[in-house]
Image (cartoon, helix red, strand yellow):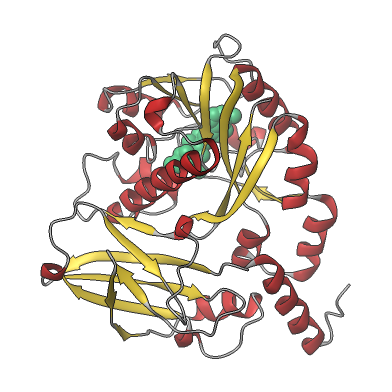
Amino acid sequence: MPDLANVSDLEDSYRAARWALLPRGLWTLWLAREEDGKLLFEGFAIPPRDLPMQLRLFVNGIECPVIEQPANEAVELVVKRFGLSGASTRYTFRCAMPMDQLGRAENLRIEFRPGTGRELSPYQDWYLRLTPRAQADTSRRVRVAATADPILFESMGISVCLAMRRALREYFDRDYTDYQAILDWGCGCARVARFVTEFGPRKLVGIDIDPDNIQWCQKNIAQGEFAHIALDPPTRFAGETFDLVYGVSVFTHLAEIDQDRWLAELQRITKPGGAVLMSIQSEIAFFRADGDFQRFLALEKDGFYVYGRCSDLDDVMPEMKESEYYKNVFHSRRYIYEHWSRYFEIVDVIDAVIAGHQDLVVMRRR
Ligand SMILES: C[S@@+](CC[C@H](N)C(=O)[O-])C[C@H]1O[C@@H](n2cnc3c(N)ncnc32)[C@H](O)[C@@H]1O
């Protein structure tokens, strides 16, 4: 255990943790918009462990000059937690690119390629759509995505949709259209499902415990079926109904006992051989959010760490205040391999797929 009184010992521990946790680097965006005929975007980036730091960002393959790197205390903290030194300006970027250099592409792909220009994990690429289509109003969006920014909301939705599609192709050699029935478990106001429907799936069903967001989906998304469900399983679906099941940021909110009930239910309603994609907050998200080494060691020891109650649903489900059903939780990767494998075959866990924060667990129903 590191000696917390000894700063250099702690820094060494962080550095070691970074070496283990971020072989492929980590980056994210926190702002993107069109301004005066330019695409403007900002964020932070940490290089993969074996590459020197060089902020190089590309939009649709074209390198974009980093015009200014605003200092940012929050980033200073995050990079320290990953055992990196130097001012935050080494890791923050602000880029501006004339829109006329980007042609007419609907989706703009932003890539971070540090140092030699070698590609980082494509699962961390961001896709932007600067003109959002019809979205839920701000309070509904904030409830599921913690941002009021319509462009970031749109971009997270499409980026996750495309990252999951990449995983389906890589691990299952399939696309959304190859599945008979897809389930979006905990769909919220369809941040991701809106984009999955663009691929024309044969059948897409979204379910959630939040009645208000489900009503919004029912009114606004004709290409899917949406239903409100109870906090506890079973659902009304027959066994082996779906051949693709995904859940974005749902297991990040449940107590272990509820997690186990839902893992069993998802197993029941997934067809044998079906694909199951679930996001989690693992050690990477923990370092970004907290970084306290004692709590980190507790996560590593127990595999499951409850960070406290999450109040995001209180306005639409006041009963949550009492029940404390909705929480913020972290999983260690080892726990996923040891515990979730009782329900599904664990195919892989992909780093920081959701906004440089949550990992994607790729599973197959045996
Ligand atoms: C952080 S939000 C993410 C919503 C959506 N997946 C997205 O990415 O925008 C988590 C969602 O899970 C829903 N949820 C929580 N527990 C659930 C459960 N047991 N079954 C289905 N949905 C649940 C919440 O109501 C909320 O909409």
Q: Position of residue 209 (x, y in %)?
A: 51, 27
Q: In which image quadrant can residue 93 be found?
A: bottom left
Counting every numbered tag in the picture gives 0
In this rendering, the answer to whether 132 lies above or below 94 is: above
Q: Residue at x 75, y 35 (%)?
A: 341
Q: Position of residue 62 (x, y in %)?
A: 26, 72
Residue 232, visible in the rendered structure:
no
Q: Residue at x 39, y 65 (%)?
A: 30
- Using residue 179 as the reference point, say whether residue 35 is left or right of it: left
- Using residue 357 as the reference point, say whether residue 127 is left or right of it: left
Q: Position of residue 19 (x, y in %)?
A: 69, 73
Q: Position of residue 117 (x, y in %)?
A: 42, 77
Q: Residue at x 49, y 36 (%)?
A: 173
8 vs 327, nearest the viewer: 8
Q: Quadrant of the N terminus?
A: bottom right
Residue 113, visible in the rendered structure:
yes
99 vs 68, nearest the viewer: 99
Extreme residue in the front direction: 173
Q: Residue at x 44, y 24 (%)?
A: 179
